[in-house]
Every structure is written in C-alpha cells, then in structure tokens.
Image (cartoon, coloured by chain):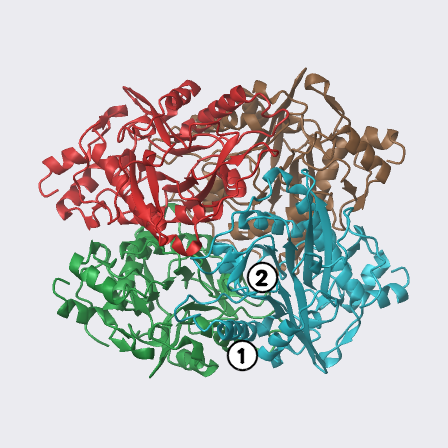
Chain colours: A cyan, B green, C red, D brown
Amino acid sequence: MDKPNPLPRAGAMPSGAGDRITDVPGVSVGHCTLAEASSQTGVTVVVPHPGDLFMAKVPAAVTVLNGFGKSAGLVQVQELGVLETPIALTNTFSVGTVLAAQIRQAVAAHPEIGRDWATVNPLALECNDGYLNDIQAMVVTGEHYLAACRDAAEAVDQGAVGAGRGMSCFGLKGGIGTSSRRATLADLRTFTVGALVLANFGMPGALRIGGRPISRGSAQALADVAREGEKGSIIMVLATDAPLDSRQLRRLSVRTGAGLARTGSFFGHGSGDIALAFSTAYTVPQDPAAPMPAVAMVHESMLDPLFQAAAEATEQAILNGLWHAETVAGRDGHVRRCLRDWLDNVPGA
Amino acid sequence: MDKPNPLPRAGAMPSGAGDRITDVPGVSVGHCTLAEASSQTGVTVVVPHPGDLFMAKVPAAVTVLNGFGKSAGLVQVQELGVLETPIALTNTFSVGTVLAAQIRQAVAAHPEIGRDWATVNPLALECNDGYLNDIQAMVVTGEHYLAACRDAAEAVDQGAVGAGRGMSCFGLKGGIGTSSRRATLADLRTFTVGALVLANFGMPGALRIGGRPISRGSAQALADVAREGEKGSIIMVLATDAPLDSRQLRRLSVRTGAGLARTGSFFGHGSGDIALAFSTAYTVPQDPAAPMPAVAMVHESMLDPLFQAAAEATEQAILNGLWHAETVAGRDGHVRRCLRDWLDNVPGA
Amino acid sequence: MDKPNPLPRAGAMPSGAGDRITDVPGVSVGHCTLAEASSQTGVTVVVPHPGDLFMAKVPAAVTVLNGFGKSAGLVQVQELGVLETPIALTNTFSVGTVLAAQIRQAVAAHPEIGRDWATVNPLALECNDGYLNDIQAMVVTGEHYLAACRDAAEAVDQGAVGAGRGMSCFGLKGGIGTSSRRATLADLRTFTVGALVLANFGMPGALRIGGRPISRGSAQALADVAREGEKGSIIMVLATDAPLDSRQLRRLSVRTGAGLARTGSFFGHGSGDIALAFSTAYTVPQDPAAPMPAVAMVHESMLDPLFQAAAEATEQAILNGLWHAETVAGRDGHVRRCLRDWLDNVPGA
Amino acid sequence: MDKPNPLPRAGAMPSGAGDRITDVPGVSVGHCTLAEASSQTGVTVVVPHPGDLFMAKVPAAVTVLNGFGKSAGLVQVQELGVLETPIALTNTFSVGTVLAAQIRQAVAAHPEIGRDWATVNPLALECNDGYLNDIQAMVVTGEHYLAACRDAAEAVDQGAVGAGRGMSCFGLKGGIGTSSRRATLADLRTFTVGALVLANFGMPGALRIGGRPISRGSAQALADVAREGEKGSIIMVLATDAPLDSRQLRRLSVRTGAGLARTGSFFGHGSGDIALAFSTAYTVPQDPAAPMPAVAMVHESMLDPLFQAAAEATEQAILNGLWHAETVAGRDGHVRRCLRDWLDNVPGA
C-alpha cells in the first residue's frame, strides 16, 4: 500500500492501528479487480470473522438513508438482526451473479441448506460504475466473488480496487476507502469502530475536505468535466468490537449519514445511500441446541463515543478512498482523474 | 383451467368477472413451469400493464409482514414508490438469475440503461420450494423468465404452476392462487382489487377454510405427514384500478395480513410474508420532460371498501390456490397431496 | 367478577392460570372508571413490574398496524427499546392530561428527572369513546391516572371498566379484555404470553367468534343499529416472561395483527391499531454504573410458539372483553348493548 | 428584529426574500415567550396556511433521525400524510398541555370533532430546556399556545424566543432559527424551501460554522463551561411550495440530517432529532364530498435542488438561531452565553 492520506483528518478521535476496518479484530477484506479495457469493475468482500459465518452469525443492522438502490439481502438483516455470509460489494448489474455465488458457497459448506435447514441469506450491495465500466457487459462471475473471498486479509487496498475499480466520487475517481476510530466510553472501556465504503456519489465540485469546500475554481472545473457523473451511490459498512445488539447497531449505522454529509453529500435523489453495521463482540448460533450468547450490551447512555466514531470513520473512509484512488480510463474513452492529480495540477485546487 | 372452487367463499364482497388479478384491466400473468423428476419449480410473472413499464412506471408499495426472506428489489420500491419491471416470482435460489434476466430484458429494450440513464430496478420475489424441488440444482435460467413473460395473458392458471410448482401450504400442495373483489366506495365509484399469491406457508393442520379450522382428525393427520414442512413463506401481490398513491398503496398492502391470518397463519418466524401492491390508474413517466400525472386520488376516508377487498381477495387467493393445486411428487420421493384429494379421502376432513 | 367466557376458545394453546395478562408474573392492571351521565370513560394502566420502572426499565417494542391514532410515547420506545412508566390507556382527548400526570408521578419519585437526569418518556395510548362518552368534556384528570395506578393488582376486571368504559366493538359494547397463552418452546421451556386490549374497533356485523361469522341476520341487525360506530381503534398490549430483546418483541407484537384479523377486523382506515409488547425476563438499568443484563435470549428459530400465543391471546382478549362487557348508556341517549344480551335476545344471533 | 447573520453562509443556493420559513407564501410563525426568573420557556407555532387547517389539510411527512424524544402526533402524520393543526413547539414537559389546547382549539372551531366526525390529531414537538428553565414547574398553559397562534405572522423572531427561550446549543444559547433557500429545478421552475428549527443540541465545542470547526481553544473553553449540556434535541420543520406528495416530503425531510451534521452534530444518543416537512402547493379536504386535489407532483428526477435546499436551509437556520440568540440566565443561576458574546470575548474564538 501507499503513503497515508495527508489531507486534514476527519474529527478528533484517534484511529486504530491501521486506520482501517480491519482494526476491529477478526475482520478481513478481500478484492477481485477487473481492469481490462472497458471492463473496470470488480468485487470486494468484508468478512466479519474468520470462522463459519452461517453457523456463527454476527449481529447486524441496516439503515437505508436513500433507497434508490438495488442492494439485495437487506430485508432479512432488518428482520433477524444477523449476517450469515460475507458482505459482498459489486456493481449494480452483478448483484444477481454474486447472490448466486454466495448461495453456492454456503451450500458447498453446508449441504443441509435449502433441504433440512432453512435457506441462506446472501447479501450483495452495489453501486453503479457505468461511467467507467461497461456495466451492460455483466463480466463479473461467481469465480470473481470467490477470488475476493480468498483474498480476504487484514491489509486493505483502497481506491480503484475491487468493487471500487470503476466508481466515481464528486466527479473524481472514487472507490473503496476505509478508516477506523477508537472510542472510550464513560466506563473507560475502549472499542474500535471501523468503516469501509464503496464511494460512488457526490455532485461534482461539492466535495468538502476537513469540512471545508474545495476552492470555487476547483469546484467549477470539476463540475465542467464531470457533469454526467451524478448518478451515484454509497455503501457504508461499519464494524465494531463493542457489544451492541441489533437495535443499537441500527442506531450506530444511522450515524454514517453524519460523516457522509460532512464530505458534501446531501443524500442525493439518485444515490443509493445504504449503511450496514455489525458487531464482532459475540455470535449467534445457527444451531438451536447451541447456547445463546449471554452478553452485557453497552449501556445506552454510553453510546455517544461510538456514534461519534461512526460519523468520523465514515467521513475519513471516504476521504481515504479519494486519496488512494488512481486515475482510471474506461469505456468509450471515459476517464476519472484522481484527487491527487487534481490537487497537484488544478490551479487553486 | 378447471372448475371453480366450491369451498366457502372468503368474505362478503362480489368478485370480479374472473375472480382473478387480471380482472384489473391491463394486468396479465404468465408462467413457466419446470416439472421433471426432482426439478419441480418455475417462474411466474405479474405484468402491471401491456406497455413499456420502464418508460411508464406504475405506483407501488411494499409491506414486509415478516422479513425472513430473500426477495430483491424492494428497497427501491419503498423509496421511489414505483415499479418499472414485471413482478417476477420464483424459488429462493433463483432470485439472482431472474434479477440478471430482468436487467438484460430492460437493457435490450432501452440500451441507455446503465449508460446515459440510471439503472433499472429488477424485482424478484421468492419462496423456498426445497421440499419438492431440488433447489440446490438451481435449474431456473433467464430464458425461463422470458418464457413466463411471453406467456403473460389474462387467463391465470393456478396451483402447481410457474413459481408455484414446488410450493407447499399447510402441509398440502400450495402454489399460485388468485382472486378479486369489487369495492364500491362511498361516492359510488366501483373499483377492483385483485390478488395473486405464491403460497408456501402454514403450519400443517392449522388451515382454516371460510374461517373454520379443519377437523381435528384432519389437522392431526396433516401434522403427522408434513412435520417437515414449516419453513414457508408467502408473496402476495395486489393490483387495483383505484387511483391511489404509493402511501395509500402501502396501506392497502398491509391488509393482506388480515386475509392471510384468516387462513390460519400467525406470520410464522420462518415465513417471509411479503406484500406488494400497485395501481393501474395512472403511470409515472421515466422521461422528466413528459407530463406528470395530475390525478385525484381516492379520499382517505373512502378506503375501507378497498381495504376489505384486499383482505378478502388475499384470503380467497390462498384458498383458490389450494383448491386448484394438484398432487406433486418431487425430489427424494417427497409428495405433497392436494387439498381435493385430502378432502375426498381423509375421514373427517 | 363473573363467569368465564363460554364462547368457543381462540386457538389451541392452553391459557395461563387466570387467562389474563397478569399470568405473567409481576404484571398488574388497574382501572379508574368514570360512569356518570354523559361521562363514560376512564383510565387503565398496565404495570410491567412492581418495582421502580424508571430505574429498572423493561425491554419493549411497538407495531403500528394502522396509524390513525394519537397515542403518545411510541417514538422513544421504538428508538430505545424500553418502557420506563406504566402503560396508560385512556380516551383520545385525555392523552395530554395523562402524559402530564405520568411526568408528575415520575418526577415525584425522582426529582433529578429533567434536571440532572434526562426526562422521562410518558406513554399514553388511546381510543375514541366519543359515541357513549362526552369526549369534549375532557373530564379525565391526573388524579384518575394515579387512582388507576393505586388500583393495580393481579385481578383484572374486564369489559366496560377503566379506559374501556365508553368503548364500542363491532357495534356492541367493547372495552377492556385480557387473556393469556402458555407456549412451550422446542427446548421444552414454557413461557406465558399475556394480552390486554382496549377494544373499540370493528365494522358492525363483521364479528367472528371462533373464526365463524355471526349469523347473517344478526350481522344485519347490528349494522342497522350501529351504523355510526365505525370510527374505532384498538390498543393491544402483550406481556411475556420469555427473554426477548426489543427486536424480537417487535416481531412478537406484529402477531397481534393475526389475532385481530380473526375477530373480523381488516385494520380499517379509521382504526388506530397499535400494539406494544414487553418482556419481564430482565430489566435495563437507568443508572449507567449498574450492571447491564447478561441474558441469553430465546433462539430465533424457537419463537413460533410465542408468536402463535401472541395471536391467540390477542383474539381471545378481544372476545373476553366483548363477553364481559355490560350494556352502557351514555351521552345523548346513546346505548351500546352487550354481546351477552345480544346473543340471548336477537333471533338467530 | 436585528441585523443579519454575518457568519459564513451555509451552502451556495440563494435565500428567499427574508431568509426565513415564511418566504414560503402563506406560512406564518408565532411565539409566546415566558421569561421570568426560573421560568425560561415558551411556545412557538408554525402555521402552514391562513385558512382552516382541519378542513384543508396540508401534505406532510416525518423523519425520526433519533427517537430519544417525546414529540406527539407523529404516528398519524406518518400514516395519513397530512397535518391538520398548527405545528406546536414547546418544552418536553408541556407536550400534554399543548396537545389538550390544540384539541380544544379544533373543537371550538368544529364542534363535530369527536362526535359526528373523527377526532383531531394534535401535534406537539419538544426539546428539553431544563438547564435554564425550571421544567418541573410546568408553567406553560393552553392560553400560551393560543397566544402563540394569535402572534403568528410573516415576521419571525429568532433566538431566545418562544419555545426557544430556554434552549441550549453546542454549550451556547440556542433556540429558534429560520432560513430559506430558492431551488430551480431542471424544468426551470423555482420553488422555496424554508426551515425553522428549535435547536437544543450539540456537544459543547463541536460547533462548525461554514463547515469549519471553531478554534481548538474556543472548543475547549466551551466544553469546560458547558459540560452538563449534552442532553439536547432538535426539531426541524421544513415548508415548501413545491408540489410534493407525502412520500416525497419524507424524502425531503431526511435531508435535514445533512444540514444538521454539517453544524457538528453526529445525531447524539440523547438528542431527539426529528424532522417534519409539509407542502403548501395544495390541500387535502376533510370533507369526502369535496374535490380531491389533482396536482402534478415534481418529477422524481428533479428533486435534487430541493434536497440540497433542505440541507442548506436547515444548516443555515441553526446558525441563524445561534447568531440571533441573546444570553439568558435561568434557574439556579444557570447561564447560557450567546454566540455573539462568545465570538467577541473568547481569545481565539
């Protein structure tokens, strides 16, 4: 990986050791990147823990800030409050393929699924990378999803990788970003909140870095080159090692909206702004005969540092993703310049 | 098709001409049925109008009574309040395949989708037919979805057809059922509410016909043969020609729960009980330059006959589906007997 | 009180010892009944446990089946998942008075509320008793709320008492009803689900007893005398000693809809159909320094008996309320006859 | 009123003529302020139009960003999508009193309410002003509500007035703020979005003005003096003359969260962050015999300028409220300094 982001930091809380979602112990991230000619796309997975997710589910929750999106698997998370597969991120038209691959993966591990047991809930979240990627070609296969799973590790490549390969953000090159924050509660316990985003949103020129709008000239220049780029979305994944139940995780996931807004988003009409939060503090067994967790959750009145961490980590993850992204050229000669180039080369940027 | 259902009718309101969802003018239904050896499954589509659904969307809304389900496409319907593809029903593991087929179908009609225009929101709703069908074989293809679309017509086959081929209901053969009711409002206008269900739910023996539990002996006998059958779900689609907006359609869709409960369901944990309602009274253009509809909706205080019709049509659709289903044998020698056989042959049934 | 309800029972599960919500240990119910001339109204409270509810909150959740209602306090229960006051039931126009009384009660016990501590969330649920009661007179006072609290006990009077004094149901005299069911889970533990309803809903003549519509003549006769009575609502309170978290309690509360539908409701437009569920299995401390509960919740796959119990107890509570209600005469000569009279005296009823 | 706010403006869109919610034609705002000794509180009303709100309701919607709040009346707005009374703002413990006053006001105008007609849905939104105000004294009366209604006019006093009298914001004096933005849609029609906030939220020191955090020294100083001040909330009311239905208004109301976040909020646990949006473009009749509106809503794809305006107007309203507030001393010697003092007197502020 490359040098750390030198832009102003989001907020005041300390980061975890790597400023990435994998600072939450047990979480890993993998990518499969497709970058050939007009195919600029891929798959990214966030794996909540290294064990068997179907047998040891993690508590989870969802917030749909703006539902102009085609992500699949959210209904069951909302009802049952657990995840039972890796979280897959990909382009809009590949959701079906990835769902099928997740089912096959789960059935391979547990042939009882769909026979003696209930079915598995695959979870595929998406943004539309159609500006750089020939999304109609539907080149993502189930094997790409499996490759991303095999790639899962603590290290997290950012920017134009995996599902982020073809994404755009504020008229610049977007994609995968990650960050983390450490939150110390009133009872002095410290937990980590990590964020990973698939950033593909933002009105060109509306970007704010460290809360400040970019220069007027820079904003205008971006708006001029990227007028077509307003059909975005963002997927925001939060992980924490704090013991929270699904209701509390939903509350945590709402706070992604604060981080998102601070980068310049107003939750645009066409942007599927969707957040998913999970906790690694305990797992919920598939087997009804296994003991259920008996865990003391965080007292509600102590949640504020975690909420603040969720907002800051989300904002930082977006900025990190912009910082690490490289310029990408894709279908029909479309190009998205990266933020670093832009800052170096645009007068006043 | 076969003879009408002689069981006691659900409720007191009159049916439309055909007692089917297609009594709402413009609505059509198509099936593609797979019935070979251990593959007992298929696809059913409900097409809201014969025109171009992407260009002329229909107002719609969703109720998730119980979210243990993998239906995809609901998030965007909840946000934007419109449908823009046929409503596809299939088995749980075929959702991804059908989503991809719906995308290809829409792109074939409108190559601008995912390029100059936003993407399309495919909509695939599901139940788990794994008792009769080898669901792990994932035999449904995109072509089967297209075949169901080509089959769409005013006539509606019921029972063990299309997506209903492998479904079970109260320990008996379930599947596709449909019905309609005519509702006269206080201002004396009359509208139709049609229901189509994919019925795959119900604790064996809990069935109520015309509100009455089936006989104790019959219930016990069903429970004995079908103990494994409690992992169901139901998809309930409502169509109406009443001018309702998305908020009102959501209210209408909640009333499916009343019809469902009267057949004996208590919205079981493992049952993805999901309702979708749409109106054919007007359409919403994709093209921002096209005129938006200026339609007087039904006055809120007049909705009760429509709500009652939604409850009655849903209950009747379930009973009609049970009545029309034939006995099906599927994977591993599993058999679901049909209600008609049962009533004829079980002492006291 | 009077003899048990001889009507057909709702469902198949056994009742608790008293067939009432107070079969859940620790729960108590109190009434204050106003029955003078045109003032036919009152207050009923359900008290989750005998201790200090503000300091030891109970996990809770809400379902709004139909939100045509003025109940107050629901927003915070939905967010925080706890109750911290008794649940107060009263008439629509007395909600404000009861809220103020609940605040005064809590502040009297804890003068820190609204100063050093956060404020308290009062919870007042309502139906409109304006047919029998001169609701515009707004005769309920804070003292009436306190009297209901003092009256709280294990015994539960039903029918035309407390908040139920002026309520109507299916064109007959409605009011307070209660019931309970015992549910044995797959792991063989047995829990109680208790229901208490404030029943003020139902289209005259649509009543179903034991699932069966009442006779056509009886229904017509009811519709004739009670044509003005369709502006109802129902509040449904569920208590259980099963260890459920707020998310699971929300799921439980949805199942009241199945019980309600089986009595003949289709969740009418004008009916505020609202359910609230709480668990007594553990409490959540106000004091952040107090230990949080570390309780193993019920495994999700074992919830079905509890769900069935919620549906059956709700249906039974409605029928019990109808059975126990006495005929009441109120404002402007309005009379609601009770079900017992009706069944005795109407030919064919 | 006093001089305009000289702080950096929020966003880039133009304001309406008065930079206030009443720039939306027909909307008026009134206050009743109580400011004696330890009673520092009041009532503010937003009146959507000058006519009879019960007979001519306005379309409306709600977003609960964080539901730690006691606002009453939201459930029915969510279900029916209309307002039928003025929007009343007050302190937490006065909600009941104001609800009762709203009912009396509506009944005085329409004696049929609660008799021949359904009841009225009062709407009282609140924040906790207990730091400056002796909230336990419950001094607000129904007459204060009526006085605020009589005061309603196009001019809008801001800061420590009406319901804002005792409110705190970021450790400074908060209260009532208002703003507006003009949004030009793609079809070149221009509409106004106005915001009025009751601002009582914010971690001392976290304030951002024009997106920039205040100086580190200033933040620390604020945190030092106002450590007790984190129990806040914010009510955000949006008005627009754009023709939007309730579903679209809900989408609009979500965008308040973006404006709120940009001032430094992360939607804290203890903050009841609630937004309400209404349109004045048409009304919905109470009388079922009256013609229903037949209005072309804004095409969904044109909503972005309205969404951006909602975010900007909310952020600006908060900053305007802070700017216009004066220093207030209340119960037990508590004082909240105003932003102007602070900026003038704190080194580095």
Looking at the rendered structure, the kind of residue marked 2 is Phe
Quarter assignment of residue D278: top right
Q: Which mark is residue A68?
A: 2
Q: Is residue A1 above or below residue D219?
A: below
Q: Chain of mark 1?
A: B
Q: Is residue D218 above or below residue A108?
A: above
Q: Position of residue A76 (x, y in %)?
A: 48, 59
Outermost top residue: D37
Q: Quadrant of the N terminus of chain D?
A: top right
At mark 1, the secondary structure is helix
Same subunit: marks 1 and 2: no
Looking at the rendered structure, the kind of residue marked 1 is Arg
Quarter assignment of residue D216: top right
State the residue in front, D131 or D40.
D131
At mark 2, the secondary structure is loop
Q: Residue at x 41, y 82 (%)?
A: B147
Q: Chain of mark 2?
A: A
Give the crowd class for mark 2: few <14, some 14-19, many >=20 residues within 10 Å. Answer: many
Q: CA distance from mark 1 to mark 2?
A: 19 Å
Whether tag 1 and tag 2 are in contact, CB under 8 A, the answer is no
State the residue in front, D238 or C316.
C316
Q: Position of residue A92 (x, y in %)?
A: 60, 70
Q: Residue at x 61, y 28 (%)?
A: C117
Q: Quadrant of the C terminus of chain D?
A: top right
Identify the residue under disc 1. B104
Quarter assignment of residue C341: top left
Query: Can the viewer see residue D52 in this picture?
Result: no
Query: Can the viewer see residue B228 in this picture?
Result: yes
Q: Is residue C88 above or below residue C62?
A: above
Labels in figure, total: 2
The answer to whether residue D128 is left or right of residue B246 is: right
